[in-house]
Image (cartoon, rainbow, N blue to C red):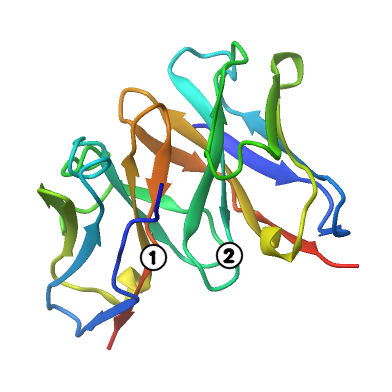
Amino acid sequence: QSALTQPASVSGSPGQSITISCTGTSSDVGSYNLVSWYQHHPGKAPKLMIYEASKRPSGVSNRFSGSKSGNTASLTISGLQAEDEADYFCSSYAGSSTWVFGGGTKLTVL
Amino acid sequence: QLQLQESGPGLVKPSETLSLTCTVSGGSISSSSYYWGWIRQSPGKGLEWIGNIYYSGNTYYNPSLRSRVTISVDTSKSQFSLRVSSVTAADTAVYFCATYTTSWAAFDYWGQGTLVTVSS
């Protein structure tokens, strides 16, 4: 069970869109639509932003969207705002009642 | 709304056992809708799933940690606990407890995390 691969950092200017990738294998991301994304401001509790690859919990801005193709899932944030600056983690079901997380991506809003 | 709070020692000596407790409020730890999980983040690294427990006591562990990890639940206290034995510096991390909601297949409620340092 290896960690999912995410870029270490991404950046964008306010109003722009950015996409964070999350690459797994055919044993996790590629086999299940059970990918979730979390926003984490250090020192605070992580927040669920996307579940089942593309669904948004109530209360999460529609500026956040998710997708999946093959072994790679993606999180897109449109209309970047300063408050979006945070760490973002992906997670996937990996079979046999186990889960795997990504290494995390630090989003900087320029 | 569910609230989770981790508690336990912030410093553990190498080779000893790390013990943490997560207290659940705002909902029932005996709900069939949830699993209760532990996740950690080592300094400068990503998140690592440690394991989950169901209110019935069924447990599910990360294969890489299975031999050293025990998760238990005390429904009478609305708490679930984590024990990691034979710790080393590599176990230094912020430990989070979280709720895994089956209908969403995601961890939707998290504690703020507690830093555990392994050092003599």
- Residue at image point 91% right, 67% down: B120
User: Residue A104's mark?
Assistant: 1
**Mark 2 and mark 1 on one chain:** yes
Residue type at mark 1: give it: Gly
Q: How many numbered marks are there?
A: 2
Q: On screen, A77 above or below B57?
A: below
Task: Give the structural element (helix, strand or loop) at label 1.
Answer: loop
| For the residues bearing labels 2 and 1, Cβ distance under 8 angstroms | no
Gap between marks 2 and 1, in whole Å?
A: 15 Å
In the rendering, at what x and y percent does residue A5 appear?
A: 31, 63
In the rendering, at what x and y percent does residue B32 appear?
A: 47, 12
Q: Chain of mark 2?
A: A
Q: On screen, A14 above or below B120?
A: below
- Residue at image point 34% right, 38% down: A94
Q: On screen, B22 above or below A77?
A: above
- Residue at image point 41% right, 27% down: A97
| Residue B10 seen in the figure | yes
Neighbourhood count class around disc 2 (C-alpha, 10 Å): few under 14, some 14–19, many 20 upward: few
Residue labelled with disc 2: A43
Residue B102: quadrant of the picture? top left
Residue type at mark 2: give it: Gly
Residue B79: quadrant of the picture? top right
First in residue order: circle 2 vs circle 1: 2
> In front: B42, or A27?
A27
